[in-house]
Amino acid sequence: MSALPGWLTQVQQTLPRWIDRVSHPDGWGRYRFAVSAYEPYDLDSSHLMHNVIYTTGGGTAGIPDEEGRGQWCDYLRGLQRPEDGLMIDEAMEGHILSASGRPTQAEVFDVRRFTTRNGLTTLVDLGGKPRYRLAHQESFRTPQQMVAYLEGLHWDNPWGAGSWAGAAVMFQQFNRLLGDPDAKANIKAALDWLAMRQDPRTGAWSDGKCDCLHRLINGIFKIWIQVCAVADLPIQYPEQVIDLCITGLTQDPLLMGTPDACSIFDVAFVLDVALSYCDHRRDEVADIALGLLPAFEPMVQADGAFSYGPEGSLRSHGGLHLAPVAQQSDLAGTAINCHAIALLCSLCGLGHELSWQPVSRWRGVARG
């Protein structure tokens, strides 16, 4: 008899059918955000589904073969524009949320920045290369520009600063793959800066003013999942990081009780990576991970996958409103919940029963 919760065993059966329902007949890479979504497929959903497929094994078609990966890469490369390398999905951008009713240039750039980072990450993970070099305002040309940018980020909020710092390194990595002669030196400058400024007491990055454990942990997550997947930033102070995570899970109000799926994903990822470098408090982490699994059952929807929260599909994913708010699964919720569950099962010893692959492993951040 399986040691997995019954609801999770059921999801193992229903999730592949849901993946099939939101897959577009035009081929690999094209997916709806939800069964009831505004567009037949979009760039954001392509990235999210890549995460779902490589974590869970996908739908009826499974994981794409070489031909399928090529089709997916062709779709993504076709969205890049030559002047700055940004990926443009005009239909998707018609659903950008804005308080003023019409998105400002800054709001449009914020969406293009995160969807380009995610889209090109998917492209590279599939074995492809970008078509054009990135040349937007965060594609720095010198190590001095890179360091000045990192130093100017708001490290009183490590969650936000870590996300932006990681993206800056990834943009350089995309250019390095195209032979950009400046990218290697810019990446090295960023890695040296990050390695020197990691706090040996906690393993976190901050300006010393942040006492929110949730944000400190999320800052580590944002840097590790982006930078360590593409460059040789050392995993330093794993024991201190594990202590920080356990303290956060037992003392921070934002992580105690029933934290949201994204927060659990972030801390579980950090713990999984840190524990691949040491055995510090491993049994304690396993007990905590097992205790967190029941929190995901309310996110299972009748259509067979997950919503972000029990109330149904998201109104906004990164500023995009891609489907009606309803009692249905969506790709943002499914990706986050699958990531978190795969990591928790790995941490508590149920990974062999679930047979999902944690993203920390298939992106090469954790050892082993």
Image (cartoon, helix red, strand yellow):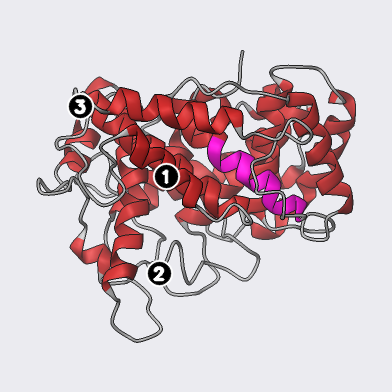
Which residue is rendered at x = 53% and y = 35% of the image? 225
Q: Which residues are magenta?
A: 212-223
- Residue 304 visible in the snapshot: no
- For residue 40, side relative to residue 242 (left or right): left
Residue type indicated by callout 3: Asp
Mark 3 = which residue? Answer: 180
Q: Earlier in the sequence, mark 2 or mark 3?
A: 3
Q: Is 84 positioned to the left or the right of 365 in the image? A: left
Vertical arrangement, residue 147 with respect to residue 257, above or below: above
Where in the figure is residue 132, as x and y percent of width and height? 14, 37
Q: Is residue 192 above or below residue 51?
A: above
Residue 150 in view: yes
* Element under disc 1: helix
Q: Amino acid at mark 1?
A: Ala
Q: Looking at this rendering, what residue extends furthest in the bottom direction?
A: 100
Residue 346: x and y, percent? Answer: 70, 28
Tags 2 and 1 touching, CB below 8 Å: no
Q: Residue furthest top?
A: 368
Question: What crowding class fits label 2: few (fewer than 14 Cα within 10 Å), some (14-19), or many (20 or more)?
Answer: many
How far apart marks 2 and 1 lie (CA) works out to 39 Å
**Residue that numbered label 1 is attached to:** 148
Q: Which residue is mark 2?
A: 323
